[in-house]
Image (spheres, grey):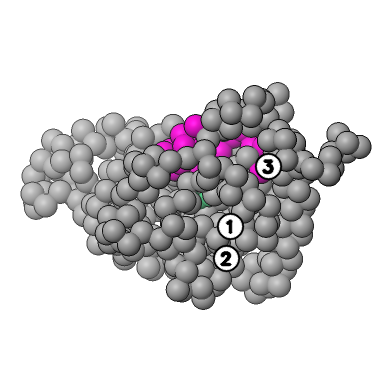
Amino acid sequence: MKNIILTGDRPTGQLHIGHFIGSLKNRVLLQNKGDYDKMYIMIADAQALTDNFDNVDKVKDNILQVMLDYLAVGLDPEKVVFFIQSEIPELTEFTFFYMNLVTFARLQRNPTVKAEISQKKFNKNIPMGFLCYPISQTADITAFNANIVPVGVDQLPMIEQAREICRTFNNIYKTDLLIEPQAVIPENKVAQRLPGLDGAEKMSKSLGNCIFLADEPEVVKQKIFSMYTDPNHIKISDPGQTRGNVVFAYLDAFSEKEHFERYLPEYKNLEELKAHYKKGGLGDVKIKTFLNNILQEILKPIREKRKTLEKNPARVFEILFKGSDEAKKDAEQNILKLKQAMGIDYRNNLKNKN
Ligand code: TRP
């Protein structure tokens, strides 16, 4: 079967190294493997508006920021169709038809939605657009027949709900039109959910505990040196904990064998380094310096590419508009197929198109 890959992000802020290790890196790998007919990356401005409808400027400004981050990490407009969600009106048609297939209770049970509702303190005043965004996310995926969706683990409940909607649709309308999408998440456990600099469960802009892809070298260094380690590891000779220690979590996510060869040749690998830390005799400055070397190496080419791209925002928007035109054509075809499967293709538009 041919593969169609689709993924995206809400443009609510610059992307950080949690996005990089949790999803962007996977996307670049998939892009370069070439095992697909088409790969789409969508900037989900309409979804971002579901909880920022009164803050349009924030969403608008971050379309460029997110796109700069995408291109800077090596996502390539020659291989990927980049588009803006609100440029594709067919997505709202898909959403409208799928709304009939999902109950209010099921939406409220969606773990990601549930967590966000309490985090955003909506209490009982939940905007319908927000509650329904998993349905619109299913539209995003199925409007392009995507079967592969590379995302972070926080998105798994969304993909599960999308699969359910596909099944329900196919059952009710006796069709096999909709393909249940498959999530692709990183294999590395820590990479799946990178903790914040402060040891919080998650790196997130709202918690102010991130290293951004665009951060300057000194800022990165200063953030690493402020990282939470083991509060009981006071003297270098003290035995230290590696669990719950943010520096070791990041080393788990980012360090490779060659980093040891380059920056810390007295240790063979991370296991040896951890063993020494646990035993005592290894100080935080040394592990932080090592992590700083690694992250500086990873972030340097990204930052430099971003700086070049930043000089020409018109060119970046050109990529997005060209991609949006192409994505719109594909969604137009697929909404006709959806209507045909439902039996509401009154003008029989598809007669000569298949
Ligand atoms: N919900 C995703 C996020 O919070 C963004 C998104 C919207 C998305 N539609 C999608 C991701 C479709 C994958 C597929 O970043």
Q: What is the three-letter code of the residue carrying label 1?
A: Ile
Left or right placement of residue 132 versus residue 46 in this view:
left
Task: Mark 1: give few (<14), some (14-19) or many (20+) Cα within 10 Å.
Answer: many
User: Nearer the viewer's eye, disc 2 or disc 3?
Assistant: 3
What residue is rendered at 40% in x and 45% in y? 104
Res. 27 visible in picture: no
What residue is rendered at 70% in x and 38% in y? 338
Residue located beneath label 1 in the image: 43
Locate the N terminus by quadrant.
Answer: top right
Left or right placement of residue 245 versus residue 13 in this view:
left
CA gap, disc 2 to disc 3?
A: 21 Å
Left or right placement of residue 44 versus residue 122 in this view:
right
Q: How many marks?
A: 3
Relative to 62, does residue 84 appear above or below in the rendering? above
Relative to 237, does residue 62 appear above or below in the rendering? below
Location of residue 227 in the rendering, given as x and y in whole percent from the top left corner: 25, 57
Residue 100's disc is: none
Mark sitting earlier along the chain (2/3): 2
Q: What is the three-letter code of the residue carrying label 2?
A: Ile
Residue located beneath label 3 in the image: 144
Mark sitting earlier along the chain (1/2): 1
Locate the C terminus by quadrant.
Answer: top right
The magenta region covers 143-164
Q: Is residue 204 magenta?
A: no
Residue 63's disc is: 2
Q: Secondary structure at mark 2?
A: helix
